Image: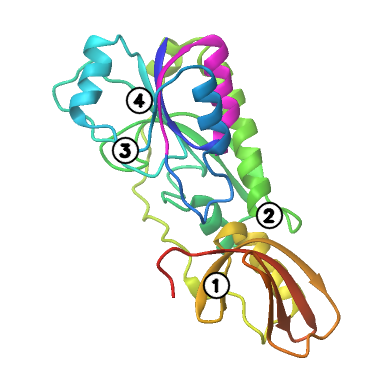
């Protein structure tokens, strides 16, 4: 089957599977500094294989071209940041989305972080048909994921990726059968919003344990203000020694940050436009 793939490194094993067993016509991807998984590896693999890489959104005209002129059989969407406009006059269109929650619960652009915010003990990953309304297509398959106190958001992403690959292998063993057997979602539950910035922000009056709990839940979405600039935190360790000051900036991407029972050792990246 010829496939147009939309996504980042989150579900890279699915991309690798399609490279081996299907034909990928193009990759559509994006970059976001707050994402722990970027697009570095998937873009590298696509270029190695001569697959065109697009950072712009796919147009309805290009969608028609893929399905009518290039014999595309499927749009496969896995961790992508744009809604795909499905043309009305394209009866042969087929699309699948991989979503990191057990739909209909967890409709969101931030399903994993929002699940961590809610303290869920069980989440999962859903394979569903693309629909005009976000995350509301018919469900093809789901798998559950357990979340315990030692599980962080990156663990959940990795478990989603592992389960998604197993679902892809199963569904593509009888694609027509699984496609025809898809079940409509029974409820129209509300969308989960992005967690409030106050929940993802570090402060001097918290403890090391409280800071680590924030980073466990939100990883690269964790934020800190240093010298009136907002940074994303993409790495954190802790120490017990007192700093003698609130902040010691060690380099452009490293800083020591005082908390009430010691300090945080932070790897940081400026949040674009946040000053």
Q: Are marks 2 and 4 in contact (CB under 8 Å)?
A: no
Q: Nearer the viewer, residue 14 or 142?
A: 14
Secondary structure found at label 3: loop
Q: Residue furthest right?
A: 241
Looking at the image, tell me whether mark 3 or mark 2 is earlier in sequence order. Answer: 3
Instruction: Give how far apart the Cα atoms at labels 1 and 2 are.
Output: 15 Å
Q: Are marks 1 and 2 in contact (CB under 8 Å)?
A: no
Residue at point 44% right, 61% down? 194
Residue carrying label 3 = 56
Q: Residue 61 in magenta?
A: no
Looking at the image, tell me whether mark 1 or mark 2 is earlier in sequence order. Answer: 2
Q: Nearer the viewer, residue 219 or 166?
A: 219
166 sits to left or right of 178? right
Q: Are marks 3 and 2 in contact (CB under 8 Å)?
A: no
When asked about the image quadrant of residue 264, the answer is bottom right
249 sits to left or right of 126? right
Q: Are marks 3 and 4 in contact (CB under 8 Å)?
A: no
| Residue 154 pos. (x, y %) | 65, 49
Residue carrying label 2 = 152
User: Of circles 3 and 1, which is in front?
Assistant: 3
Residue at point 62% right, 81% down? 203
Looking at the image, tell me whether mark 3 or mark 1 is earlier in sequence order. Answer: 3
Marking on residue 199: 1
Q: Residue furthest left?
A: 89
Marking on residue 95: 4
């Amino acid at each position: 089957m010829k496939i147009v793939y939309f996504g980042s490194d989150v579900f890279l094993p699915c991309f690798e599977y399609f490279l081996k067993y299907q034909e990928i016509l193009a990759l559509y991807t994006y970059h976001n500094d707050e994402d722990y998984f970027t697009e570095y590896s998937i873009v590298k693999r696509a270029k190695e294989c001569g697959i065109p890489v697009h950072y712009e959104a796919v147009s309805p005209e290009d969608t028609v071209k893929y399905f009518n002129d290039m014999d595309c059989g499927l749009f496969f969407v896995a961790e992508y940041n744009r809604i795909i406009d499905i043309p009305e006059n394209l009866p042969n269109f087929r699309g699948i989305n991989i979503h990191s929650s057990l739909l209909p619960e967890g409709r969101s652009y931030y399903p994993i972080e929002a699940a961590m915010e809610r303290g869920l003990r069980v989440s999962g990953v859903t394979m569903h048909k693309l629909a005009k309304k976000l995350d509301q297509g018919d469900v093809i398959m789901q798998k559950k994921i357990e979340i315990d106190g030692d599980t962080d958001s990156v663990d959940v992403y990795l478990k989603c990726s592992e389960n998604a690959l197993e679902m892809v292998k199963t569904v593509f063993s009888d694609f027509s059968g699984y496609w025809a057997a898809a079940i409509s979602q029974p409820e129209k539950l509300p969308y989960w919003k992005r967690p409030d910035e106050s929940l993802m922000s570090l402060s001097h009056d918290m403890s090391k344990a409280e800071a680590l709990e924030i980073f466990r839940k939100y990883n690269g979405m964790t934020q800190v203000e240093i010298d009136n600039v907002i940074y994303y935190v993409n790495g954190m360790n802790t120490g017990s020694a007192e700093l003698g000051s609130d902040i010691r900036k060690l380099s452009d991407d490293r800083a020591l940050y005082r908390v009430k029972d010691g300090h945080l050792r932070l790897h940081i990246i400026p949040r674009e436009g946040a000053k």
